[in-house]
Image (tube, helix red, strand yellow):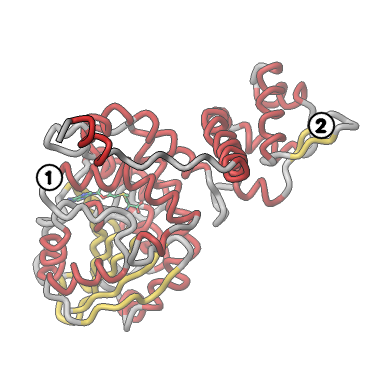
Amino acid sequence: MSTAVLDAATAAPAPAAPDPDRLDALVGRMLGDLGAVYILPLVRIGDELGLYAALAEAGPVTPAALARRTGAQERLLREWLSAHAAAGYVEHDAASGRFSMTPEQAMVFARSDSPAFMLGAFEVAYANTLDVPAVARAFRGDGRGAGYHGRCACLFSGIERFFRPGYAAHLVESWLPALDGVVAKLERGALVADVGCGHGASAILMAQAFPRSRFHGFDYHAASVACARDAAARAGVAANTSFEAAGAADFPGSGQYDLVACFDALHDMGDPVGVARHVRAALATGGTFMAVEPRAGDRLEDNMNPVGRVYYAASTMICTPVALDQAPDGPALGAQAGPARLQAVLREAGFSRVRVAAETPFNMVIEARP
Ligand SMILES: C[S@@+](CC[C@H](N)C(=O)[O-])C[C@H]1O[C@@H](n2cnc3c(N)ncnc32)[C@H](O)[C@@H]1O
């Protein structure tokens, strides 16, 4: 048989002609997405210069008046405000030429204590763009992933600001009460480890709520540990917290802890089963392991939604290369591992009573007991 006949026999089928309506819909959707991507640097500038807080405080204001309040360059500020108005992130009154924020816009952009505060999420997205070279190296297969230690500093502050509003809204109010008997122990005075504590947001919130308990934060990233210590001092909980640089599979304290918690970190770890085994050994009799993980379904097709979209992208840039950096042949669970996979990890580590105890739109809380 000639090669021409073979090629014809094995050639890929001709691609179907594009459907103009579907193409229109896709391009229209991309335009919306591009608007979000293009405004990312503007949001970072607004965050760094305090423009959102100033606008929320000022009420309806002209660019010139906002420039006077903030010291920002007026012409640039007008363009920045126009871009935000076109995005629906601020309001514009055509008659007066003034810009303002609705209470909802202020909650998202200006109030760091609001549960809807989003500037941390934008900061993480920005960090991901800065970390493209490191993650691209991992994609090229240099044998390692891209660990936390090589990332830009705004990733760590961004993660803290992204997650803290959710922890502030749910941790003390609903997640800890969903665990069997844990709140009573915390009220009496318990010993708690927060593993992969980052900048310490979760340990600090718990230390404020339960002053009779002691909270030890551990993280292998020494710079984050130093930030956690400073944050605890600022929050007035230095006396019942401590923060130490230590790996999740070898933090100190065998058979001691009433509660070990891991917030948005277990799936980042190269050897999650080894970590969970170490946690189990660190628990006192009757102790509980609380793994707070990103909310997900068990299959890709369950996660085809806006939350899954954000998490898969963040997981490609952060969680998966971080885990591969620690264990190139490890499971690299990723941020959308889902409850079945995570519960299997905990059972493999020797926990026999494992369940999803609580869920919010962004997180699920897994309780594991020996
Ligand atoms: C997504 S961040 C979450 C930080 C913090 N728990 C929070 O919720 O804000 C994951 C954290 O896990 C830490 N981490 C990852 N692998 C670790 C390991 N093997 N041992 C200790 N910490 C680890 C990272 O340094 C990072 O601070």
Please tell me whether residue 18 is drawn above or below residue 169 in the rendered image: above
Quarter of the image with the N terminus in it: top left
Other residues around mark 2 within 10 Å, as few (<14) / some (14–19) / many (≥20): some
Residue located 58% across and 37% down the image:
27
Residue at image mark 2 = 98
Q: Quadrant of residue 290 in the image?
A: bottom left
Q: Earlier in the sequence, mark 1 or mark 2?
A: 2
Q: Secondary structure at mark 1?
A: loop
Residue 14, position in %: x, y? 40, 39
Frontmost residue, 259 versus 92: 92
Q: Amino acid at mark 1?
A: Pro
Residue 115, position in %: x, y? 55, 57
Residue located 26% across and 38% down the image:
223
Residue at image mark 1 = 328
Circle 1 or circle 2, nearest the eye: 1
Residue 227, position in %: x, y? 32, 41
